[in-house]
């Protein structure tokens, strides 16, 4: 594929909007073979629940019960989105990378590790299954071979959803510890001389997009994608409580 679009959303969005946009990008990959990488932020501390995650009574640890919540399209455990950079990549079925979804984890995470190294962050893939339990409520309390670690702490995890051969992968890079999940340190908590990270979202986005195409073009959502995201936001992602009612 010759071109990958890079969308850097500098205006933080709500959980419902962010998840709706990610799904709209997946639909664009299905309908128009669009290859897109997006980096974005959240306008409030928000919990995203894994698509298949069963939650009858969410734990009230650190006040998380009272935060906005959204059920995302991908699986896995809940993520507390606060001091972080979030990325998403939508890869069409015609792209060679879509033939190996686990390969996309390795491709994207290797690109992220290279960028972090330039910021003085010595990060690496976990490489083996973690000792953490798969039943833990929070994703960052679970362990996966594709996790990115820094000083033994998980600082990035990703999840996927496939549709008609196209792949949506999105993930969270923890920058700093959140008071709503104090058990999880961010990368800037773990390095001796915290680096300035203002340019990090753009650099991460370009590095990821460069793995999918020879040319990276900065862009924005199309009018049709905005309409799709708006419909999805109201119909699928606007939730009244933790169980999606």
Image: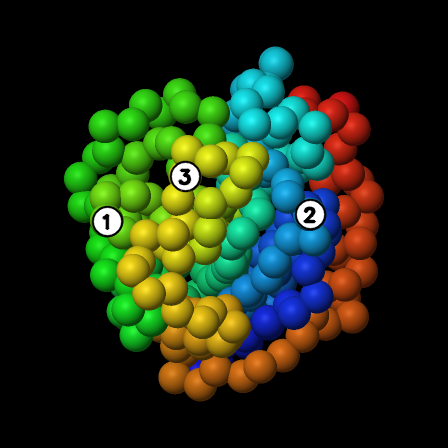
Q: Which residue is mark 3?
A: 184
> In this rendering, would 11 be left or right of 95?
right
What kind of element bears circle 1?
loop
Of the residues under marks 1 and 2, which one precedes in the sequence? 2
Q: Quadrant of the N terminus?
A: bottom left
* Residue 214 x %, y %: 39, 84
| Mark 3 crowd level (few <14, some 14–19, many ≥20, 10 Å Cα) | many
Q: Tell me, what colour scheme is on the image? A: rainbow
68 versus 201 height, above or below:
above
Q: Residue furthest left?
A: 128
Q: Residue at x 69, y 70 (%)?
A: 221
Q: Which residue is mark 1?
A: 151
Q: Residue at x 70, y 53 (%)?
A: 43
> In this rendering, would 199 be left or right of 66?
left
Is residue 111 visible from the viewing direction of this image?
Answer: no
* Residue 58 x %, y %: 59, 19
| Mark 2 crowd level (few <14, some 14–19, many ≥20, 10 Å Cα) | some
Q: CA distance from mark 1 to mark 3?
A: 12 Å
Residue 44 marker: 2
| Mark 1 crowd level (few <14, some 14–19, many ≥20, 10 Å Cα) | few
Camera-side residue of 72 and 176: 176
Q: CA distance from mark 3 to mark 2?
A: 18 Å
Is residue 216 visible from the viewing direction of this image?
Answer: yes
* Residue 210 x %, y %: 39, 77
Report the label total: 3
What kind of element bears circle 3?
loop
* Residue 208 x %, y %: 40, 69
What kind of element bears circle 2?
loop
């Amino acid at each position: 594929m010759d071109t990958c679009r890079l969308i850097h959303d500098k205006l933080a969005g709500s959980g419902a909007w962010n998840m709706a946009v990610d799904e709209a990008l997946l639909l664009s990959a299905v309908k128009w073979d669009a290859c897109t990488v997006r980096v974005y932020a959240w306008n409030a501390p928000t919990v995203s629940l894994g698509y298949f995650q069963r939650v009858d009574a969410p734990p009230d640890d650190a006040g998380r019960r009272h935060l906005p919540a959204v059920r995302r399209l991908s699986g896995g455990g809940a993520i507390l989105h606060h001091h972080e950079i979030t990325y998403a990549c939508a890869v069409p079925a015609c792209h060679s990378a879509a033939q190996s979804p686990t390969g996309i984890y390795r491709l994207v995470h290797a690109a992220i590790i290279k960028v972090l190294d330039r910021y003085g962050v010595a990060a690496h893939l976990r490489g083996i299954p973690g000792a953490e339990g798969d039943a833990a409520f929070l994703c960052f309390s679970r362990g996966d071979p594709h996790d990115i670690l820094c000083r033994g702490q998980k600082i990035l995890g990703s999840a996927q959803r496939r549709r008609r051969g196209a792949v949506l992968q999105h993930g969270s890079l923890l920058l700093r510890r959140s008071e709503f999940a104090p058990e999880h340190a961010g990368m800037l908590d773990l390095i001796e001389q915290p680096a300035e990270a203002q340019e990090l979202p753009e650099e991460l986005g370009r590095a990821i997009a460069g793995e999918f195409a020879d040319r990276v073009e900065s862009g924005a959502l199309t009018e049709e994608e905005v309409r799709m995201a708006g419909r999805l936001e109201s119909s699928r992602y606007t939730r009244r409580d933790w169980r999606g009612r």
